[in-house]
Image (cartoon, helix red, strand yellow):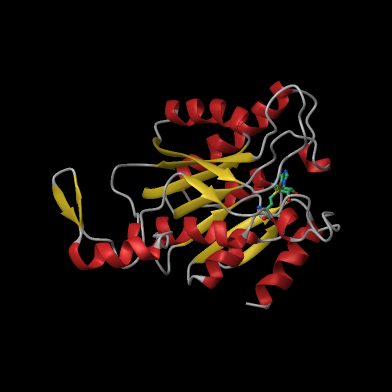
Amino acid sequence: MQKLKINKLYVMDCFKFLKLVDDNSVDLVIIDPPYNMKKDKWDRFKSTEDFFKFTYSYLDMLVPKIKITGSFYIFNSPFNCAFILKYLLDKGLIFQNWITWDKRDGFSAAKRKYTNAQETILFFTKSKKYTFNVDDIRIPYESEKRIEHAKKIGIIKNGKRWFPNPKGKLCTDVWHFSSERHKNKINGKTPKLPHTTPKPVDLVERIIKASSNPGDLVLDCFVGIGTTAIAAKKLGRNFIGCDINKEFIKIANQRLKNI
Ligand SMILES: C[S@@+](CC[C@H](N)C(=O)[O-])C[C@H]1O[C@@H](n2cnc3c(N)ncnc32)[C@H](O)[C@@H]1O
């Protein structure tokens, strides 16, 4: 990377920042951009058309930055993801998963439809040759008793004897992580957090463990208070990132220092 320092977060607009990132230089992109849900100043757009114009513009700039062996994850609402999925398919990315994040917390109560309690994470790769460390994200089995029995003699599945993996079961595309809002509730109320929509570090760690290796470069051009950078640093990956808001970058740098 010639024009940017690795392991540094920039106070910068994503479009300016992405111009400085070399093409084919990033192993993993994880972005949590605006959703157009009016959650904060940075999440307000004049119209849905304006929101998608903004979204498609940064996607156009991001895709060439990913290495041919690289992966791409984007958070958004299920509604917006339906459009983003089509857009990225048309740009030639390979769709891998529609991950449903069960936030253990609702957006807001609905009386005329089901209350929304999920967000979507789309997972794409640039080619069929990509990192996926399936064993690093295995999940402990729920029933220890059943596993104890199966460990000894196995279980017959589809005519074959199956033994449980000591590292746990395979990770599915439905993820259960409490939102930061939910985790920080006191007597049912959320105190004011330093950011309106921070993502859980443990959730982002799962993405980084699965789709990168130590020493790889992870990019996030909407870092907020630095969740992706923190998870990358904890796991021995390199990062680059930016946010347009200097207060958020200040908090992100403080959090990074504490690791
Ligand atoms: C959903 S939040 C990201 C939260 C982050 N994942 C975290 O855990 O802290 C989206 C972020 O995008 C930033 N943002 C909005 N428009 C931007 C732009 N044009 N360039 C760079 N950052 C922008 C906002 O300041 C906000 O912090």
The quarter holding residue 204 reads bottom right
View extreme (left): residue? 159
Place of residue 84 in the rendered image (x, y in percent of width and height, measured from the top left): 54, 30
Q: Is residue 1 visible?
A: no
Task: Tell me the residue at 84%/59% (across/down).
Answer: 187
The quarter holding residue 192 reads bottom right
Task: Tell me the residue at 42%/63% (across/down).
Answer: 140
Place of residue 62 in the rendered image (x, y in percent of width and height, measured from the top left): 53, 42
Left or right of 99? Residue 255 is: right
Q: Is residue 186 visible?
A: yes
Task: Tell me the residue at 61%/40% (across/down).
Answer: 119
How many labels, in total?
0
View extreme (bottom): residue? 258
Above or below for 147 versus 57:
below
Place of residue 19 in the rendered image (x, y in percent of width and height, measured from the top left): 59, 46
Above or below for 146 versus 84:
below
Place of residue 244 in the rendered image (x, y in percent of width and height, measured from the top left): 75, 50
Of 102 and 9, which appears nearest the observer? 102
Of 115 and 133, which appears nearest the observer? 115
Of 20 and 31, which appears nearest the observer? 31
Q: Which of the image's four quarters has the C terminus? A: bottom right
Left or right of 192? Residue 164 is: left
Above or below for 149 versus 190:
below
